[in-house]
Image (spheres, rainbow, N blue to C red):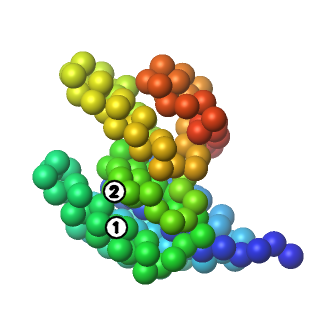
Amino acid sequence: MKNKIHIVHVAEAWKGGVATYVESLINAQVQDKHRVTLIVDKNNFEADLRQLNCDIVFFNGSRNPAKIFNVSREVLAHLKALSPDLIHCHSTFAGVYCRLQKPSAKTIYTPHAWSFYKEDVSPLHKKAYQWIEQYLAKHTDRIICISQEEINAALKAGIPQNKLSLLYTG
């Protein structure tokens, strides 16, 4: 018999491809009888679009640099109260909120497209985002990339290869 664990997914936005990906993971994990919780920004959650069979906890997200530490503290307080076995954070800001301070549980991060790899980002911002991701990788047990291109971008940005795994979606 497999050991059942408590998995917490953290997402800033609940729409589009990220929502589809996380919803698929949640459904599979619930089907395997794991306890699953979703922590999501209440300002970016379209509850009428999704039927989830898991607990949902909301936080007040912000992309304002002056508020990121406060949001991170709120998310980490939820994580501490939930005491999960595994944390899986999805996309840039959820990844920052979770990994700014190392959570006590094993932590997985899926970037769903690196912030430093976007074409509409200035070279200065790209460099800053690379540095931030290098730092946050230290607080991450595994980074799941969903394409070889994402792996290559991570390596080029200086993210350690031993943190990276490739897992195609679909």
> Disc 2 residue type?
Tyr
CB within 8 Å, label 2 to label 1: yes
Residue 127 in the image: state x and y as whole percent: 30, 24
Residue 7 in the image: state x and y as whole percent: 57, 68
Q: Is residue 121 above or below residue 63?
A: above
Q: Secondary structure at mark 1?
A: helix
- Please tell me in which quadrant of the rendered image residue 102 appears: bottom left
Q: Secondary structure at mark 2?
A: helix
In the picture of the structure, the residue carrying the numbered disc 1 is 75
> Disc 1 residue type?
Val
Q: Assess disc 2: are there few (<14), some (14-19) or many (≥20) residues with their C-alpha within 10 Å of its C-alpha.
A: many
Q: How many marks?
A: 2
Residue 126 in the image: state x and y as whole percent: 29, 25
* Residue located 77% across and 74% down the image: 3
In the picture of the structure, the residue carrying the numbered disc 2 is 97
* Residue located 72% across and 71% down the image: 32
Is residue 55 at least partly visible in the picture? yes
Quarter of the picture containing the C terminus is top right
Observer-nearest residue: 106 or 50? 106
Observer-nearest residue: 87 or 141? 141
- Please tell me in which quadrant of the rendered image residue 113 appears: top left
Among the two numbered marks 2 and 1 on one chain, the one whose residue lies closer to the N terminus: 1
